[in-house]
Image (cartoon, helix red, strand yellow):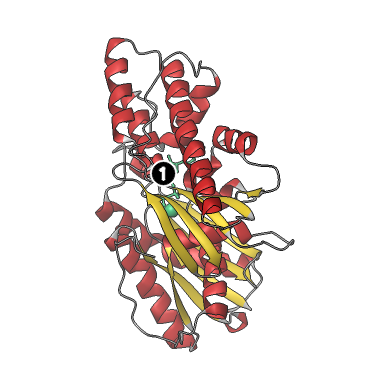
Amino acid sequence: MKILAIETSCDETAAAVVEDGWKVLSNVIASQIDLHAKTGGVVPEVAAREHVLKMPAVLDEALKEARCAFDDIDAIAVTRGPGLISSLIIGTETASVISYVKNLPLIPVHHIVGHIYANWLDVKDEIKFPILVLTVSGGHNEIILMRKHNDFEVLGESRDDAAGEAFDKVARILGLGYPGGPAIAKAALNGDGKAFKFPRIYLEKGSLDFSFSGLKTAVLNEAKKHMHKNDLAASFQEAVVETLAEKLLRALETLKKKGVEVKEVHLAGGVSANLRLREVIHEKLPKNIVFRYPKSIKFCTDNATMIGAAGYFLYKHSKEKFSSGKNIIPSAEFRI
Ligand code: KG4
Ligand code: ZN
């Protein structure tokens, strides 16, 4: 089954063709990074206008790269939210029109569920449930138990800044530019992660929630005293990574006590591109648990292949009827 997928939740205009939930036939992303670097972050109105301009060429390219015509496509999948409403509307309207004109099923996909299914892309071996997922993106940070396809239980979430948001804000404090995650990771390579002892916030005993806003303030206070960019970046990254890894281990323990034997641990979302995060989790996880993150860095950050993968499994495993041409109401809310 070939799915044409569209993703416009933030500042990437993306389209892809994915076959059977794992095989990537094309992956086209028109980035707006240069545009938003000028303002140090995304201005929603500017992003939406850019989506309108880029969408036709991106769709064209996605079909061409996949060597497909519209008639070869079996369904349309599109991000329904959460995200910037004005950006989401461009994607959902485009998808509705194609679905109506071509009489194809229309599958609305939750953005974070998309990130989770990025772990199925290009994977040929069997992925085993139950899976514990750590979602770390710019807007979201959760620990999720996935018992089977399309079955997600949120065990913990960020009470303030998401991990990626913290990376972006600290990069701004350090004058490292936008997007912050890759810039911090690069600066950290030349810094000492033990130079500053930043707080690791674990909240109340037993809580699987996160909080990163205090850490951001701690970096700001230290940066006002002395701007050792590389050491500050490295010490900040260590604090985030250690907190995330520790919470993941606590979640595994909690589940074990309840009799849930987790088979795999997955990283999902833009921060899953962080090599230090992968390294520390890999070191700490029990060796009988399979550890996965998206196979390509391109699948970590926002893209449409992940929406195509998630759309496939939703279509296969949901009782819902995905009729053609129906309107999708985009949503900014998180609930999966
Ligand atoms: O998942 P994503 O592309 O968009 C959202 O759904 O939010 O995540 C973007 C986030 C940004 O905050 C970016 O700074 C972060 O992912 N990011 C990274 C890295 N690459 C991207 N954070 C840490 N290390 C990286 N290498
Ligand atoms: Zn995302």
In this picture, is 119 found above or below 105?
above
Left/right placement of residue 182 relative to residue 209 reads right
Ligand 1 in which quarter: top left
The quarter of the displayed image where residue 123 is located: bottom right
Front residue of 161/93: it is 161
Front residue of 172/200: it is 200
Q: Residues within 10 Å of mark 1 (few under 14, many from 20)?
A: some
Determine the residue positioned at 49% across, 68% down: 151
Q: Position of residue 126 (x, y in %)?
A: 71, 63
Left/right placement of residue 235 relative to residue 286 reads left
The quarter of the displayed image where residue 81 is located: bottom left
Figure disc tally: 1
Taking the image as drawn, is residue 304 in sight?
no
Badge 1 residue CB within 8 Å of ligand 1? no
Label 1 sits on a secondary structure element that is: helix
Mark 1 = which residue? 33
The amino acid sitting under disc 1 is Ile
Determine the residue positioned at 46% across, 28% down: 237
Determine the residue positioned at 58% across, 33% down: 280
Determine the residue positioned at 40% across, 13% down: 228
Q: Position of residue 36 (x, y in %)?
A: 34, 43
Q: Residue furthest top?
A: 226
In this picture, is 28 found above or below 21?
above
Front residue of 272/178: it is 272
Q: Position of residue 335 (x, y in %)?
A: 34, 63
Q: Quadrant of the N terminus?
A: bottom right
Q: Quadrant of the C terminus?
A: bottom left
Q: Position of residue 76 (x, y in %)?
A: 50, 77
In this picture, is 16 found above or below 12?
below
Q: Residue furthest right?
A: 125
Taking the image as drawn, is residue 36 in sight?
yes
